[in-house]
Amino acid sequence: MDVELRGVTKRFGPVVANDKVNLVIRGGEVLGLLGENGAGKSTMMNILSGLYSPDEGEILIDGKPVQFEGPGDGIAAGIGMVHQHFMLVPVFTVAENVVLGVEPTGKFDYLDLKRARAQVRAINDQYGLEVPPDELIEDLPVGIQQRVEILKVLFRKADVLILDEPTAVLTPQEVQDFFGIVRALRDAGKAIVFITHKLHEILEVADRINVLRQGRIVGEGDPKQLNEEQLAEMMVGRPVTFAVSKSPAQPGEDRLTLTGVSMISDRGETALDNVTMTVRSGEVVGIAGVQGNGQTELVEVITGLTRPGRGKVKFDGQDITRASVRARHMAGMAHIPEDRHKSGMVDNFTIAENMVLNSYYDSEFSGPLSIDWPKVHETAARYCVEFDVRTPSVFLRGGSLSGGNQQKMVVARELERQTRLVIASQPTRGVDVGAIEYIHERLIRARDEGDGVLIVSSELDEIMGLSDRILVMFEGRIVAEFDNTGGKADRNAIGLAMAGATTGAMA
Amino acid sequence: MSLSNQDLQKALLRPLGRGRQEFEDLVVVPLIAVVIALLFGMVVMLATGVDIGTIGRAFVALAKGAFGSLNAVSETLTAAIPVVLAGLGLGLGFRAGLFNIGAEGQILMGGLAAVIFGFSFDHLPFAILMPLTLIVAMLVGAAYAAIAGALRALTGAHEVISTIMLNLISYRILDYALRQPFVQKEGRSDPISKSVPDAAQLPKLLDWIDPNLRLHAGLFLMLAMVLFVWWLLFRSKIGFAFRASGENPDAAKYAGMPSGLIIVLAMATAGGLAGLAGGAQVLGVLERASPGFSAGLGFDAIAVALLGRSHPVGILFAGILFGGLEAGGRQMQVDAGVSIDLIGIIQALIVVFIAAPLLVRAIFPWGFRKDGKGAAE
Amino acid sequence: MTDMTMTHSDKIDLSKARQTRVGGVILILLALLVLFVLDVPMGSVATFKLSRPTDAIPLGDLVVPGGPFNLVAAGILAFLGVRQFLRGGGRWTSLSLGIGFAILVLAFLIWATTGKSFSLTGMLQATVVRAVPIALGGLAGVLSERVAVVNIAIEGMLLAGAFTGALMGSLLGGWGGLVAAMIIGGAFGFILAALVVTYRMDQIIAGTVINLFVLGVTSYVSSQVFSNYRALNNAPVFRSWAIPYLSDIPVIGPMLFNQNIFVYGALILVGMATYYLFFTRSGLRARAVGEHPRAADTLGIDVYRTRYVHVIMAGMVAGFGGAWFTLGSVGRFDENMTGGRGFIGLAAMIFGRWHPVGALAAALVFGFADSLQQKMALLNTPIPSEFLAMAPYIATIVVVAGLIGKARAPAADGKPYVKE
């Protein structure tokens, strides 16, 4: 089945999300769609799935124009989506999730789960997906959950599969398995749209590439004739230097030491298992690993949000295992949280209020009881200028800023004061390239001023680019350590360690 | 730092103009809400067989009873005092993300404590006894509310259910207390407490004009508390933490604000204000405790807090409006024979339209700024 | 590998140990309570009547020697407590505590009845009757929270149902009143759904406002109209209807098979709701809307419509439950006569883990507390009646405080859904 977008435009108020987009999707082919955050990729997908209707232009399926009016219309026409954030009900079984919306039923609306399971097994066998139909989703690893998503669209007889950032949650090895599935689907005649911002992946798996920037298709090409630099330039609109320029680390005394830290999560699983590690002043330590292998809990233990069951955390030689978040903050620990919306900022607070969210009580900003607002506003204005937060006023709601500016606001709050240790969790998630470069530069500057810096990121490229030393986490343990001076760490070995292969060199 | 940076900084500090949206939310929507609610009240009267003439008289009486004379104004303000005080507490709770329905119980407990303390220490002079009695009312209200706060902080029990249960429990405690020999008025078989001594009472403000004017010194207490809560919420450190926890508890936790302590403190402050409301009511108006003497004040206060958008000044105005409805409602019942319970309906409707601005915009689409996502707040 | 599993299980023990020990201490305290406070003199007996003179199959009275019984009860509690304290085992904690509280209630009953006699069957029958509005309120809560709408308005819906039942029952007779009560309940369900789904009002505020509104309207009409026209507030009451043969079974017969339409209706509705939610296609979709509305939306399930339908159904169930107060008992409406039963129903829903059968079971516990305090008042115990009257409310707080975190609410509960 072929699908074509012709001159599709979609506006949200004054913002043009898609601007006269032309796109051709063919059966038996993997189309790679490359673009930064905010380039208009998700708008385009939502148009294809029927969630949005375009303001201008048309959608043609096998040459015939179609009208989508609701979210169900895309799938009914054979266009299936695999979302980046899985659309799975965690407390339902695989079979229940797969059939949801198109359930086999008996008399009295009876839900025929037996038939559902048989149908799931049939597709399983056809494409070699190997998904257990009776497991609860929440008990399955993310790699398998993703296959459930694919199963869902196949079950609905989709001929076009749109995969949105599908590799974000996978280890490099799982990515290879996943590419195998993608190729198998393509060879079975399905049309695949592979959306990503990762250059090497698109070069590896796509048969044809389209690049999207600021809502427009700005380039098209054959992966065999393109390299990463050319693609990056098309995507960003200017030449991009990938390597973060930095001098070799000058590690000093120990800033942060964890000894034998273990913790059980609320769900009763081992989240951290005997973690021992050190961050020294003047070095960047990166934590690599697939999401959900204990990184979140590690950061929570270091920043004082949760207490470990066992083990010790030391900061500048002081035992802070039971110290409060505030005490750690006052001692010079900065924390850039992994999800700024959820935990890094208050949308309905002004930029100024957000800038002092965790330092308002400091004698710099307040007396014994009340806050010195003029001082706060002045400081916030200075931070905004320093960190290039683009806003007309510090009295604007924090939530009204763009993602990149929000992140810069959070980073400014954390770094624009005397710090000794910086904990940065996913510091550039959902941020445009310009902001990424800037945030990276500031983190390196913090290191050069003698801070210890700990970076947790699910983007292996980011870890490899910034870190002087890389620790790999798997199932709550530190399973490998790599020296990355001059970027010399072996990407492949890190990937293996992320997948739990214990043969990795403990350097 | 270069000069141009300083210019940039200065530009960032220019105050934002108050937007039209803000004007609509703070003034237009509440006004429309009041008008629709009054119209609906008319419909209810028609539906229950009240004739047009009586309805007209009812509305005239409502207005006259609320603002038509010195006595009406005195009654309106007297009725406003407890709902504003309790409403301030509830508004503060809303700001901190706590939906405290328990003002009713906190008023009862605070008022009961004030009565008992008042007559137990009747030998103390006015300058000591009156303030001390109010403080006791405040502390008891705070302690009673803190129970729900502690349950929320320690076990996660939702404060809506626990405060409602605490309300129901408070009625029983009051009933029990009123049967006790040391509380019950001598020589009475019905559950009525002893009277509060003069030295504990809030002095009447206008009795030099007419001894029937009931307005009392609680008025100053109310105004002082409006100022205090405003300072607490928008100027103090703890208020900043309250607001941050209310808007985004996760971010507050990440910023090192102790969430459990904040919940307990916010509940206790809210309860303290409700306790004060109870104290002011018994020391200024009722002079004794009787079963259910709070008479639904705690629920009116919820409406007042919502109508005032949880802002102290808004709550003051909303409270005066509700006081007016209350005082006018009594006049309405006397003059036109329409039950004062009608006021309850009107109050609930006002809140519906306030709390769902989208609804007002749907009913009155014209005149509002065109905006796809016109959700206020 | 062995090393890792060791750390794991060790630490689980560590965290559970404290909880276990707390459970043990509570049980030992209960034992002391039974031993010293609920102290019954040896030789005195408590008499429980198991049947009434009119019953088809009469049973003798159950005579319990109070002193020995409570000694044994204290002994069992102490044993459970010590065992819990020393050996623990996470799985046993809740079971031991459950048994412990059941023993406490029995010991309390014996203590209160000592030297007197009272009808056990009567109390159990009252338990079921008093559980009805709570169970229906809880069921209404289950229906709306399963689609992620927090329904604080159940109290108001019960009150509206009670009012309408009385008014329309007076005009149209019992059945007319019942149908009208359900329609009004459904109408308030529709209003709640409109406010929170379409107008995205805060769910708790919307519910509170509906409660205030219903209280206002019903109080207004009853003082404005009912006081002048008594005939409008004089509805027929549904008599109990004995199921042949089954109602003759001792104890259970009067409890379950000689009741009025509200008891049967509640049992049938709970059964139907269970089948609907967990065994049908529509139920699966409804639960998906409650757990992950965005996922449901992408699969073509209309989230808004689903929420409307279920909240309206919840309203109708609550309206039926509300009619119990008038058509099922006194036939007359009084201001605010529901007295917080709707909120207790919400607690029953939480206690019952968002499952209809669980909510019913929890409602029976509350019904028991309710009927217990009623009977205790008759027995002239030294405990002031006000404190006994608090029992259901305190039980509600304990349940809500003790169970949150252990029971899992639908994931999207209370969150408005905004379509993209």
Image (cartoon, grey):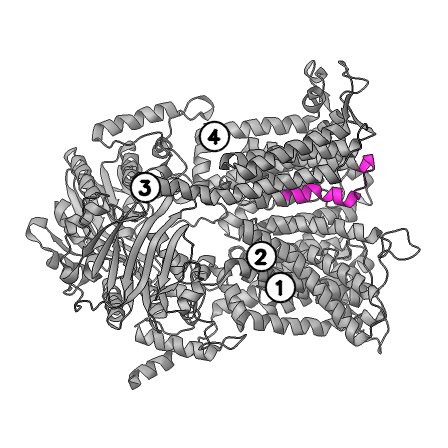
> How far apart in space, not on screen, are marks 2 and 4 (Cα)?
37 Å
Q: Are marks 3 and 2 in contact (CB under 8 Å)?
A: no
Q: CA distance from mark 1 to mark 4?
A: 45 Å
Which residue sits at x=28%, y=34%? A151
Q: Amino acid at mark 2?
A: Phe
Examine the structure image and report whether residue C26 is included in the region drawn in magenta: no
Residue at numbered disc 3: C3
Give the structural element (helix, strand or loop) at label 3: helix
Q: Residues within 10 Å of mark 4 (few under 14, many from 20)?
A: some
Q: How far separated are the C-alphas under marks 3 and 2?
A: 62 Å
Are there few (<14), some (14-19), or many (20+) residues within 10 Å of tag 1? many
Give the prevailing secondary structure in the magenta stretch: helix
The stretch in magenta equals: C377-396
What's the residue at 63%, 65% (across, down)?
B88
Q: Chain of mark 4?
A: C
Q: Are marks 4 and 3 on the same chain?
A: yes
Q: Are marks 2 and 1 on the same chain?
A: yes
Q: Are marks 2 and 1 in contact (CB under 8 Å)?
A: no
Instruction: Give the SS element for disc 2.
Output: helix
Q: Earlier in the sequence, mark 4 or mark 3?
A: 3
Q: Say which residue label 4 marks.
A: C278
In depth, the one of A362 and B332 nearer the eye is: A362
Q: Judge whether residue C182 can be spotted in this image.
A: no
> Residue B269 has which mark?
1
Q: Is residue B334 left or right of residue A57?
A: right
Amino acid on which the number 4 mark rests in the picture: Phe
